[in-house]
Image (cartoon, coloured by chain):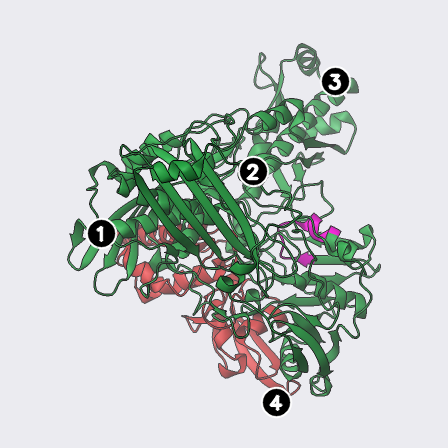
Chain colours: A green, B red
Amino acid sequence: MTLHSAKIGQPVSRIDGLAKVTGQARYAAEPHPAGMLYGFIVNSPIARGRIETIRDEAARAVPGVVEIMTHLNRPHSALFEKSYMDGLGVPGSPYRPLHDAEISFNGQPVAVVLAETFEAAREAAMLLEVDYERWPHNADFEASLHQKYMPSKTRSNYVPPKSRGNAAEAYALSPIKIEGRYHLAPEHHNPMEMHATTVIAEDDGTFTVWDKTQGPQAVQAYLTSALSLSKDQVRVRNPYVGGAFGSGLRAQHNVFLAALGAKMLKRSVRITLTRQQMFTHVFRPEAVMNIALGAQPDGTLQSMIVDGVTDTSRFEHNMENLVIWGLINYKCPNATADYKVAPRDTYTSSDMRAPGAATGVNLFEMAVDEMAYACNMDPLAFRLHNYSDIDAMHDMPLTSKALKEAMHEGAERFGWYNRPIAPKSMRDGKELIGWGMATGIWDAMFSPTSARATLIADGRLHIATAASDIGTGTYTILAQTASEAFGIPIEMIDIELGDSTLPECPTEGGSWTAASAGAAVWLACQSLREKLFKTLGKSGNISAWLTAGLSNNTTVLQDGFLQDKDADENLRLSLSEALSLTGQDRLEVEETAKPGLRGTISQMRKARFTHSAVFCEVRVDEELGIVRVTRLVNAVAAGRIMNPKTAASQVRGAMVMATGMALHEESLMDERVGRFMNHNFAEYHIPAHADIPDMDVLFVEEKDREVSPLGVKGVGEIGMCGTAAAIANAIFHATGQRHRSLPITPGN
Amino acid sequence: MTDVSVTSPCRLRINGEPCTIDIPPSVTLLDLLRERLDLTGTKKGCDHGQCGACTVLVNGKRVKSCLILAVSIPDAEVTTIEGLSRDGQMHPMQQAFLDQDAFQCGYCTPGQIMSAVALMEEGHVHTREEIREFMSGNLCRCGAYNGILDAIEQVIAQQQQDRAGEAA
């Protein structure tokens, strides 16, 4: 079989797929070093207070228990708070596991049982007795709103809202007004793989840490700093990650505690959180947004006033870009927004897929739908009427915005143009039918990233970067990029990711990996080809056609062979032959893709976003109130699509999660104890097969040479933004009832 | 209090191979596979029978291995994802999952595949709606549901073709 180079843009099947469908892919809890201990975390049942006494006799008596680690006997870890700051941390005082007796949130680890077997560790954990001094707490979001504030030091990625015109006056003068309080319940990421760490205590005293993370280098930096270890003592690996959706952006307590136990006992340790414990750490913050819109009777927006709050813990200031999206995406002469955070006695809320925008865009797009109806306009026509070609908040041009095209193509595919405007006008037996739409917007980001490309003796190309593939298709798109950039079949490429020792790559997230790691691999492969040609040219023992070709620049590298584009195609040289002619057993380069001067200027002058238009059909049982989503179309404008197969899966996956946001997902707080009480899959429902219809994802052509070196914008988040609103808006169209709080359940 | 040091004999056939091991009675089939036999293809997603990631076949029927104590099914025939391929050849369902991009992170995938293989045997595959209903015990947070349905339908179509070929 002749092998051909794959190209960027082809629907290549996942190259990591074979390992995944055969069960060979190893995740964080799956290496099994000899003599490994199992750690089981004991959590605080109170939200605030201090540990008075720990009685561990019964727990220690369980056969197989080796140690019970608490704040009283833990080994040394760093003294200062700043040593616990992680790369993507937020301002404030980071939580330090087992640091002292103080309790700051329900579920806080108070001890780790380390035992020879999982069963012994779990048994002993249940027998540990801890007495607490209880202090008053508040875990109620509504009550915390009275204490809302703007942190004096903001998160590094926080974009402050910018006002224009006089929004209050314009609102007062607007003939058509809507005003509402919109709300999103807290949500938990709930990747199928629970957070887990296996620390392998190596013979040379170093630790190899298999962790469920989106950033192996960030975890490596955190562990060395927090545990006062030297940089070469810790290597972090995450070749396969069973989903994360943001829960693996920051180092979680399981990795710290497993490493602490390994340091204490000089033995390998594994800690896997239970599904219940997955509700004791990060979650998407609860949010409230007050939105007021004013318009002329012809549907021209006159004023937008947005005021939003998300929750945070008492010790850290988690912030989201919640209130800015409508101000950026809509033309409107007067607009203002305000944002605050509200503290409560829980763990710190955190980034979850499309942080800020998933909440802010969906809630704002629900208000836009209300405004369209107040103006008696079709919701799509209303959006086109108020369409902005620029970033209207910063008054900045955009590198591209094919949202209009997405709106038209999506509407066409859905059949939107036949829609009756009046709500409750379509029905099939007992079911009311509604059609709704919304638009989506998310950042298109590019971060400096390094990659290494190595040609090895058997002619294979080895690519390495410390990126993480959390199901995003990174292995595959990087192989496609290398295949096209170097001129080698994809079958002859090995991609190595998920290891802190590899060339520097930022933590995976925010949809920036495809653009950033892709650019780095492209650059490294081009540079390696040049190096190969140059080295061959100097070697002196190559055939005449190649000597001539190299000096005339007619030599090409194609499908894994060096050829002369002007000469007989039978004259060709395989890569292993070429490498042996250079006299070296490997050729290697490492390159870093950076925005550069031109890119930096572009980033200052132009804003960059991904856009989408989502169309939805729901059926609502009129008697029971049960909602079924029966059709979803999402037209996405995301620049160049590296792999339409994996990209469509990414968008569909986010649409599934957004369906959960609209209809199912809600972490319910028991305010009396400060704990999310529905901490399992039976009571926290994530969409199942039967909840999800066939979804149609289309990518709109959008050529953008400026947004990133390869013209890529990224597709990981955009499916979240707009989809939940489209569902909510369809429910209004079906029933005539407005719901301003997500999720919309039969109960409300 | 259960004494986790008391063990009982456990005798099974796993992927065609006999397996005899002394374990505490509280060890689930899932933990036996993952922690004592290094068969980590079967995944733990909740340990409560709510997510389906641990689905394996016991005597040909799909079960959630986290809800079964290993000592409670003496002499049972257990098939895990590792036992699905034969002689290095992928099972048609594994190939279909690859073709249809029926997974992303891959963590729920072994459970989805085992469940889908059993579903075919059960015969609940007449319509897409029926497949959806009977696959709903297997959660996928990446949201690969459309692809999983397409994969199952790919195998159904292949079987129908094969049968038509045999008939002709």
- Distance, label 4 to label 1, CA atoms, is 56 Å
- Which image quadrant: the C terminus of chain A? bottom left
* Secondary element at tag 1: strand
Q: Choose the circle earlier in sequence order: 1 or 2.
A: 1
Seen at 37% across and 40% down, the residue is A172
Q: Choose the circle earlier in sequence order: 3 or 2.
A: 2
Dot 1 amino acid type: Ile
Residue hosting label 3: A537
Dot 3 amino acid type: Gly
> Residue B1, which numbered label?
4
Residue hosting label 2: A514
* Secondary element at tag 3: helix
> Residue A273, which numbered label?
none
Seen at 67% across and 79% down, the residue is A133
Please state the horizontal and vertical placement of residue A363, each as a whole percent of the image: 41, 48
Dot 4 amino acid type: Met
- Distance, label 4 to label 3, CA atoms, is 76 Å
Q: Nearer the viewer, mark 3 or mark 2?
A: 2
> Residue A433, which numbered label?
1
Q: CB atoms at circles 3 and 2 under 8 Å apart?
A: no
From this view, report whether residue A468 is shown above or below residue A202.
above
Task: Please check the rendered image and state whether residue B19 is part of the magenta-colored stretch, yes or no.
Answer: no
Of all chains, the one bearing label 4 is B
Q: A130 or B76, which is in the foreground?
A: A130
Of all chains, the one bearing label 3 is A
Q: CB atoms at circles 1 and 2 under 8 Å apart?
A: no
From this view, report whether residue A601 is shown above or below residue A142.
above
